[in-house]
Amino acid sequence: MTENINQEKNMLVKLQSADDLRRTMDGYFARLKDAAETHSRKIAWCTSVGPAELLYSMGFEVYFPENHGAMLGAGKNADKYIPTAVAHGYSPDICSYLTSDIGAFLQNETPLQKSGFASVPRPDILVYNTNQCREVEDWFSFYSRHFNVPMVGIHTPLCISDLTPEIVKSVSDQYHRIIPELEKVSGKKFDRDRFSETVGLSHDGCVLWKQVLEKARHIPSPINFFDSAIHMGPIVVMRGTIHAVEYYKILLKELEARIDNNISAVPAERFRVYWEGMPLWYRLSNLAKLFARLDTCIVASTYCNSWVFDDLDPADPFESSALAYSKLFIVRSDSVKENILERLLKEFTVHGIIYHESKTCARNSNNRFGLQNRLFKRTNIPYLEINGDLNDPRCYSEEQSIIAIETFVDQLAGR
Amino acid sequence: MYRLGIDLGSSYTKGVLVDENNWMAGTFCVKSGYNFNNAASKIIDHFSESHEIESPVFTCGYGREQIQVPFVPNSELIALSRAVYHIYQRACSIIDIGGQDTKFIQVNALGQVDKFKMNRKCAAGTGSFLEEIAFRLDVTPAEFTNFAKDATREVKINSFCTVFAISEIIGMIKNGATLPNIILGIYNSIILRSMEMALVEDHLVITGGLPAMHPTIVGLFKQRYPDSDSPEQAQFLAAFGCVLLNSERKSIDLIPPDPLPL
């Protein structure tokens, strides 16, 4: 039953660390801008779960087009740019990060212009890993052709059930194989100690990020998915730097204090829900308010958990990178995914699951091959499927989704 | 005193008057139009002429909070499930076909919603789909359902999109397909779209405006699901359920009416 809404009671509590987050992200973009303007350091473009550690260890500033795509989505501008990419032959059914990013580029617009960038920072090299999807290669190919700069990549097998030593070795070998091109572009010799150190920093950042996410096991949770989707910025773009490590120490401390003081992300948390799939960047705030109004906290998500690479090991940087980046959820088989989800549902005391079927992101839509039905049979935890998209708001019917979400919470209440 | 449930749907606003024994004492339906408050007022005025109505009224549907008398909003699916369970007193699968939505609901033996699903973004296969096609073919709903009885052979409609479905139908007419056969094909395409939503696990109850206005489709459902039916007043069950749900509650969270922006 929809409750009478007391807005004050349901007001979301903002994390104080947001100011530190802004400073941390501003610092990242300032370094990128400096490199772009002064050419003092080379710039590598990297996929969001690509070999960032290798790039940082070789002195590159690293730019992540997916982060840019999310900025376009969160800024509610993606639908302004997607048609331009479509007119250039990119289907509206493929990744809307890709189409909004390329569309914005073709229109010579970027939210970075607000931070003084003339345009997105020009790449000296493009580096991808197909562990998340194949489309990143096509995406980066566009820019490789446009800027006439080299592109190197790591091809990871998909749908991995058994993460065998052969797979890890294959990926590790590919790490080795891209180094000569990186040396050529950077003008620097690869330094194994520096790489180990960077992998160590990435590990430490990932462990802290994991601890941040695990604070949501507490009832009531001090953090929700909508906070995490914003506060994950440093682990995505500064993984392998001290900046991410320092930021997550601050955030973790705040969450510990919240737990000590019984402050919850959703003031009157009654229901705890797992979010499977991509965020709807253009409706993040609306959905955060909707769930708060329904006294429902999204306590865990596949998406935010995807940047926990705690297998990274400075003692064995190549093998451990190959292991960590081939172990992540998106590249695993459904049977492995089901086991991971079942564990998370228990650990976070989840009452229900919401699957966001993202129109343009098949790899992050895990309700397309019956996983949701199988998991329900195993756990008896109810689920809801909503249709939308990560960036393209035209794929999302808001009123219908609100009704579905409200009904789902009512369903949980009736159990 | 009577209680009033109002389902403010995308196409029609349905009101159900409920007596103290939880029996339906009257039903009334108007087009929702662009102003839900006007539609609800017509319902309230209609019943107020002859009955004393308790305040608040109980609402559900797209316009559930868009009225200017004291009201308690409800989830339409939960209300519908409650009404179906009230009638059948057993586990049921429900397919509800409304103006813009097709819904599947699985209600367990305790009357709880086990799962539900709504149609995807597209409205093909809903009442709007049928209305649009009827308009383009210049056939009324009553004629539509009667025509289907004369069908000799189903013509398959393949298009997902309403507009493309119309193009497909025009092509069929050009190629000599008869109207009854085409209409049978349209009905069956609606059934197929609702069937793909989930597995029917229990007695199937077909509700909503579409089966009420197109009773032929209920018979076609029955051919596929012998253990199925559509109760009387199938269009009014969500409104009825709103009242039933609230008659079980100990306290009511009332939403006072706000001035509506016009």
Image: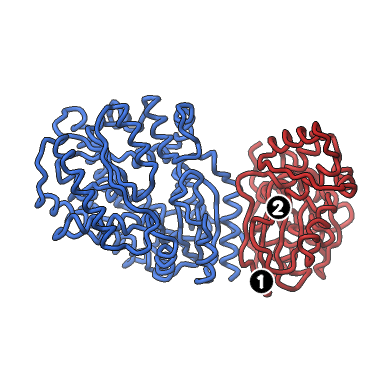
Chain colours: A blue, B red
Q: Amino acid at mark 2?
A: Leu
First-in-chain label (1 vs 2):
1
Q: Quadrant of residue A321?
A: bottom left
Q: CA distance from mark 1 to mark 2?
A: 24 Å
The nearer-to-camera label among 1 and 2 is 2
Could you tell me which chain the residue with mark 1 belongs to? B
SS at badge 1? loop
Q: Is residue A205 visible?
A: no
Label 1, on which residue?
A: B108
Rendering quarter of residue A107:
top left
Total labels drawn: 2
Which quadrant holds the C terminus of chain B?
top right
Percent across and percent down for residue A412 are 56, 66
User: Which of A347 and A406 lies nearest the eye of the viewer?
Assistant: A347
Q: Is residue A413 left or right of residue A175?
A: right
Q: Residues within 10 Å of mark 2 (few under 14, many from 20)?
A: few
Q: Which residue is mark 2?
A: B192
